[in-house]
């Protein structure tokens, strides 16, 4: 009998592959999560930039410092120059001048899912950058990492394997039978003023089995459990961002039920656009089916965002034109273009917004910031339009 050209792979060899993979992961984590270190936000703003952010003149800021309404700025002991303002100090200015953009308590908190069942489309990238954009604007933001891959958790400075206890600090305990009644137990402050995080790690995947077990013994509609948890904390935030897993499972369905708006990231290539079309078709059928058991879920908006767009590729341009033609009222006008600046920041588990200098070239950084600001600004406007307390100022700005 002729011997196979390729011998079968044994379980022992698979174990060796697993061991080598663990070694690589540990080395990467040792580089990015040095023992005893914690991530910090090193952004500093000049008085002119702070005045722009606060929507007041730099003279008014200096006057408020002089009369004691604001603390005097820190100065470099060697040069005597101002060190610049931190984001926390800018938010203190906003509070003094009454320019914090918080929603009115009568407005509903925005619960926004960045969702697609296809992986690699820029979902977590969008969640992290949108959260930080909104924080820079002065909003109160909560990020809920619903994905056991925990990419968003890592970007916010936590090592999912070491810093996060799956039995105590992720969504998993909340889904267990007899678990906590609210999500307050899992809320964490971050190094970003204005952003709280509910982290994830690999153990969150067990929630899928917990859902199945609860459905077998519980007559209530368990897919609304996440929505109930968000209801318990939403009064503390303006915007709650959900980062679901890139798969059709119980957690993803729970996110669809919990959100009141959805942004769908979709790169303009055949495979990803095809997957997005299937996602939309499946989402419609699934929500109709779930509505029969748990009631109809309404959304303030559902928008598709073209991500990873490369203008130099004719295929990208052709598919983007097709997306605009097929979804003329559903596409965001802004496009998140492919950028080495995002890739280089992500390699260090960071975002473009927290870089204190260009990761590549200065011009590349400026272009990337412009793309991000355009996308996030458009989403911010959609959010504000859902808040009646913002309508007067939107009309004054000519945006409503």
Image (cartoon, helix red, strand yellow):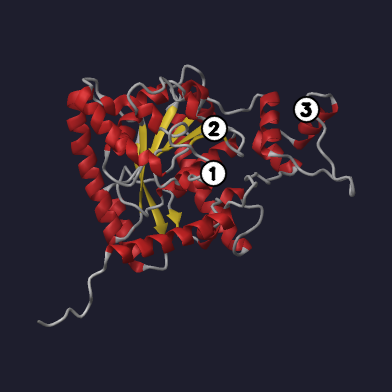
Q: Nearer the viewer, residue 83 or 53?
A: 83
Asked if labels 1 and 2 touch by Cβ distance under 8 angstroms, the answer is: yes
Q: Nearer the viewer, residue 262 or 351?
A: 351
> Can you say whether 149 is above or below 90 in the image?
below
**Residue 75 point in image, percent of width and height:** 84, 42
Question: Which part of the image, by quadrant, shows the C terminus?
Answer: top left
Disc 1: CA contacts within 10 A as few (<14), some (14-19) or many (>=20): many
> Can you say whether 175 is above or below 278 in the image?
above
Residue 253 visible at all: no
**Residue 83 point in image, percent of width and height:** 79, 44
Report the residue at 47% width, 62% height from top: 24
Tell me the residue that label 3 is attached to: 70
Report the residue at 23% width, 75% height from top: 7
Measured in 3D between alpha carbons, the distance from the residue under mark 2 to the one under mark 1, in whole angstroms, is 11 Å
Tell me the residue that label 2 is attached to: 188
Q: Residue furthest bottom?
A: 2
């Amino acid at each position: 009998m002729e011997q196979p050209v390729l011998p079968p792979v044994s379980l022992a060899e698979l174990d060796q592959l697993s061991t080598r993979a663990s070694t690589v992961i540990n080395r990467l984590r040792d580089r990015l999560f040095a023992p005893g270190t914690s991530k910090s936000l090193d952004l500093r703003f000049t008085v002119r930039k702070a005045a722009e952010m606060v929507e007041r003149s730099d003279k008014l800021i200096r006057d408020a410092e002089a009369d004691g309404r604001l603390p005097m700025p820190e100065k470099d002991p060697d040069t005597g120059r101002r060190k610049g303002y931190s984001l926390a100090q800018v938010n203190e200015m906003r509070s003094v001048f009454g320019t914090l953009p918080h929603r009115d308590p009568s407005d509903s908190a925005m619960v926004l899912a960045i969702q697609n069942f296809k992986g690699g489309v820029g979902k977590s990238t969008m969640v992290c950058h949108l959260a930080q954009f909104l924080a820079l604007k002065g909003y109160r933001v909560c990020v809920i990492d619903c994905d056991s891959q925990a990419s968003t958790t890592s970007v916010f400075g936590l090592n999912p394997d070491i810093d996060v206890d799956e039995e105590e600090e992720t969504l998993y305990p909340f889904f267990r039978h007899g678990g906590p009644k609210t999500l307050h137990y899992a809320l964490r402050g971050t190094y970003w003023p204005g952003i709280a995080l509910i982290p994830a790690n690999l153990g969150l995947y067990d929630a899928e089995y917990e859902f199945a077990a609860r459905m077998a013994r519980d007559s209530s509609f368990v897919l609304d459990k996440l929505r109930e948890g968000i209801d318990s904390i939403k009064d503390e935030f303006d915007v709650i961002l959900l980062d679901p897993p890139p798969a059709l499972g119980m957690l993803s369905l729970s996110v669809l039920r919990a959100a009141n708006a959805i942004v769908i990231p979709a790169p303009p290539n055949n495979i990803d656009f095809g997957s997005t079309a299937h996602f939309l078709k499946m989402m419609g059928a699934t929500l109709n089916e779930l509505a029969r058991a748990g009631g109809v879920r309404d959304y303030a908006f559902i928008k598709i965002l073209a991500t990873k767009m490369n203008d130099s590729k004719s295929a990208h341009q052709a598919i983007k034109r097709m997306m605009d033609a097929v979804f003329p009222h559903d596409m965001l006008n802004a496009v998140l273009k492919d950028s080495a600046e995002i890739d280089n920041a992500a390699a260090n588990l960071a975002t473009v917004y927290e870089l204190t200098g260009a990761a590549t070239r200065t011009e590349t950084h400026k272009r990337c910031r412009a793309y991000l600001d355009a996308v996030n600004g458009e989403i911010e406007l959609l959010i504000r339009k859902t808040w009646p307390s913002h309508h007067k100022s939107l009309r004054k700005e000519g945006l409503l």
